[in-house]
Amino acid sequence: MAWRVARSTFCMSLRDRFPAMLAGLAAALLFGQVASAPTASAQTAATEKVIPLPRERPLLIEPSAPMGPADPNAPGSDPLNLLQGLDVSPELFATPGVDLSKPEYELQVMARLIEDGDMLLDGLSWRIYSAQPDRDGSFELVDESISPAPVFLLPADDYIVHVAYGLANTATRISLVEGSLAEILDLNAGGMRLTAIGAQDEPIFARDVSLSVYSSEQDEYGQRKLLVEQAESGKIIRLNAGTYHVVSRFGDANSVMRADIRVQPGKLTEATIRHRAAEVTLKLVNEAGGEALANTAWSILSPGGDVVKESFGAFPSHVLAAGDYSVVARHEGNLYSRDFTVAPGLDSEVELIAQ
């Protein structure tokens, strides 16, 4: 009975001490401080020795899986909505580029030919440009009108105002930042009216004359800038004040007259151009007064031998400036020639006999 009690007591003592012994053995194995069961002196030394704490190790994060095509059925696959909570109504973007912080002011413009002159009431063309050029150097067209005195409603800013009156034009820069403005532009312009007549003061039909207006300045190649092509005889041409080079061509040959004409501001300049020329009809006949031969080639030459005009036919007609000429006719391999003179304003017929 006593043995059973002693055995029971031993077992209970061993069961109570087993966890502590197991913890001590695990610590010894972890830090490599014991290789066998500790003695009493070793236990005393162990209680006095400071056991270092384990070294901290960085937390390892498992790398995320490579990104692939989004699975719309997978949970959490909805894209991040960057516009959440913002007002993206289309009305907010209906007028892009408009600075709502700038007030709008009225700009009224008028034009006159000269300072202190009367206001022009028609024939004007207005354009408003931004004063700041684009990257390519051009200026943005903001507004335009053909009214004589238009009123533009513009945001506060700087602008270039351009007005054209025929070929006359001018421009000015205005600042519309402090309030509405009324601006008057002086064109410093006048008018030119051209009329072409013959040597006997006879009028020349518009279909027979060509009037062109060029600038007076010439470039390095001696060329002038063409301003008006096929100007109508008797019609007023509106131009800035200055000198212009006018070329009048009568017919299709060498009757060409040139003149430098000065336009004065606020005045109409009348210019009459007289052509010293006449119309000549050519005929090749077998006998005097006979019928003209068809299939004839013609060459009109100057006294120096330069070709003035070439043509083909039975009886061609050309307007030639007054002077002396030679004509050569070619028909069926034969050449025929003759000298003749053109008198100013006297139309004539030049007949060659095929002999």
Image (spheres, rainbow, N blue to C red):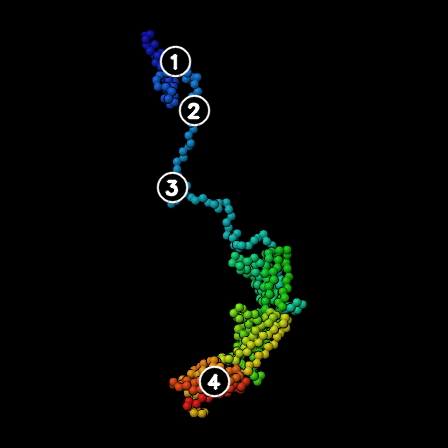
**Residue positioned 33% across, 7% down in the render:** 2
Q: Sequence order check: which comes first, mark 3 or mark 4?
A: 3
SS of the residue at dot 2?
loop
Residue situated furthest bottom in the rendering? 288
Name which of mark 3 and mark 2 comes first in the sequence: 2
How far is disc 3 from disc 4 in space, using C-alphas? 96 Å
Q: Secondary structure at mark 3?
A: loop
First reached walking from the N terminus: tag 1 or tag 2: 1
- Badge 2 is on which residue? 53
Q: Quadrant of residue 257?
A: bottom right
Nearest-to-viewer mark from 3 and 4: 4
Report the front residue among 290 and 105.
290
The amino acid on which the numbered mark 1 sits, given as a three-letter code, is Ala
Separation (CA) of disc 1 from disc 2: 24 Å
316 or 140: nearer the viewer: 316
| Residue located beneath label 4 in the image | 326
Question: What type is the residue that disc 2 sits on?
Answer: Leu
Label 1: which residue?
Answer: 40
Q: From mark 1 to mark 3, how far is it between C-alphas?
A: 59 Å
Q: Which mark is residue 66?
A: 3
Q: Position of residue 153 (x, y in %)?
A: 59, 59
Closer to us: mark 4 or mark 1? 4
Q: Position of residue 88 (x, y in %)?
A: 50, 49
What is the three-letter code of the residue carrying label 4? Ser
Could you tell me how far apart the alpha carbons at marks 4 and 2 are, in whole angstroms? 128 Å
